[in-house]
Image (cartoon, rainbow, N blue to C red):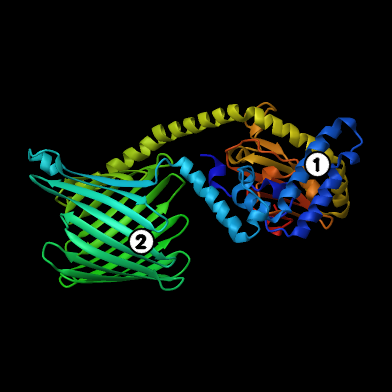
Amino acid sequence: MKEEEDGPPNRELYALLHISPDASDEEIRKSYRQWAQIYHPDKIQAPHMKEAATENFQRICEAYEILSDENKRKIYDIYGMEGLTSGLELGTKLNKAEELKEELERLRKLKEQQKVAAHFQPSGTILANMSLPHFLRGHGFMRGMAMTSSVQSQISTRNTLSIGGNVAVNGNSGGGGATLVFQHQLSPVSSIEFVGSTGLRSLLGVQTSRHLSQHLTATMGLALSLKDGSLNLSNMWTRQLSETTSGSIELALGSDSTIGVGWQKKEQKSSASGQLKLGINSFEASANYTRRFSKKSHGHLEGKIGSHALVIEVGGGRKLSKFSTVRMLYSIGIQGISWKLELHRGGQKLIVPILLSRHLNPVFATGAFLIPTSLYFLAKKFILKPYYLKREKQKALENMERTSAKVQEARAAADKAKQLLQNVANRKQKKQQELGGLVITKALYGSVKALKKRDEPVEPNDELASQFIDVALPLNFLVSDDGQLKLHEGVKKSGIMGFCDPCPGEPKQLYVEYTYGGNIYKVVVDDYAELLIPQERHRI
């Protein structure tokens, strides 16, 4: 996956002028004048550098033209250069910010429509119940199967229609049903939903939801059973307790009245939730925790206790691709010992529970947990990891071959820009050395993997050397007179004068070694992160 698809916008023009994305009009003008003086062709005496100066001067002028125009800057901030070349009309038709926003939104929706052939969002689940005891008694391995499927369509701006069906087979019995859901957005803060189903659960219902405040949502529903004529009323209140935590209270009145409380916490690398539900003759409590170990793997732990259940479930999953994930879970409880295999792809799920034993034998339970776990880690080490490393290396090589001409051109342009900066950069460096100020002694920008091996000896034509570039000179040029250097947050560093992208599509970092006050410092920052030096915490 390409880095640009997941990261912040490129914002190369801000890097080009060495300004923050939040820079004022005055800051933009000031920076433009400074860079224009450096790259103006009339300032360059050497004939062989005139062409490079002209090219960079034109880039500076183009950046200033876009960022100094309010409408063009808004378009660039949201959609980048593609938005400016997409045919969006500027001028008297789009003087108001609201009109500009509407037009940008129209273009965005048009682009989405071109990518998606239809507005339908299908989802479905196939559940195949397997049983080893059932098989050993001679009744077959398959114990039962269930399938659910639904299609949701945005039929208008405010209306959504969903049609679904389900079928279940268990032994010699089975059944099915169909569901129709129509949702209407009453206002930005409220909606109403009409539900009708037939088959296993024949009912008619209506549900309305409203945001009572920024952090509080209330939902109320009423359902009429077509089988026994009973009415069921449900109420739920959801409260945002913090940026990562929410809580809920639910009350259901009817043939099976219950009251429940729940909470959910979702952070960058982990999520957890819990629920307690009390009925007239039953109770149930559950909690689960999921931890992401890397971009591709996660672990899961879940426990449930109630009137009819006592089970602990532990396992993990791995992301196979952008849309596919596999999981394996181990369960032990009063109903026995089982495995559960899951495959998730897009909105589709395949779930295969396998009952291994109805008896809680300690030896069997330990083996059922350790054997698949050991096999997974052995397969991961000797099969999966080598395969993925080989595949990633192959993709990287293919990407390098595909972009080699573009990268060579960008490197040549960066070298020419460095030559134009060299005299000023050398003067600044010499002045800082005399004052005991900030001097960049080494700076490398490029692939994260390559920078981790930066201290290893490499040949000039080595594959590793092609994954990063030396940027000490342009950074010395950017050091201010008072001995400070700041690279702004949210701006991709490949756009800085004298920089280039040596490995398109790969995650990148900037490694800097510098001296200040006679001491040595070093720091590594991500591509879009802020760099502010000198800082005492960088001291070696």
Residue 219 placement: quadrant: bottom left
Residue tagged by mark 1?
57
Say which amino acid is labelled 1. Phe
Q: Residue at x 60, y 48 (%)?
A: 79
- Asked if residue 534 lies left or right of residue 505, the reply is right
The reply to whether discs 1 and 2 touch (Cβ–Cβ < 8 Å) is no
Q: Residue at x 66, y 51 (%)?
A: 90
Residue 354 placement: quadrant: top left
Residue 363 can be seen in this image:
no
Task: Give how far apart the Cα atoms at labels 1 and 2 are.
Answer: 54 Å
In the rendered image, residue 536, in percent from the top left (x then y), is placed at 71, 59
Observer-nearest of 484 and 248? 248
Say which amino acid is labelled 2. His
First in sequence: mark 1 vs mark 2: 1
- Asked if residue 516 lies left or right of residue 376, the reply is right
SS for callout 2: strand
Up/down of 104 relative to 218, above or below: above
Residue 74 placement: quadrant: bottom right
Up/down of 463 relative to 101, above or below: above
In the rendered image, residue 504, in percent from the top left (x then y), is placed at 61, 36
In the rendered image, residue 474, in percent from the top left (x then y), is placed at 77, 44
Observer-nearest of 283 and 231? 231
In the rendered image, residue 76, in percent from the top left (x then y), is placed at 64, 49
Up/down of 126 relative to 224, above or below: above
- Asked if residue 355 lies left or right of residue 381, the reply is left
- Asked if residue 242 lies left or right of residue 71, the reply is left
Observer-nearest of 270 and 194? 194
Residue tagged by mark 2?
184
SS for callout 1: helix
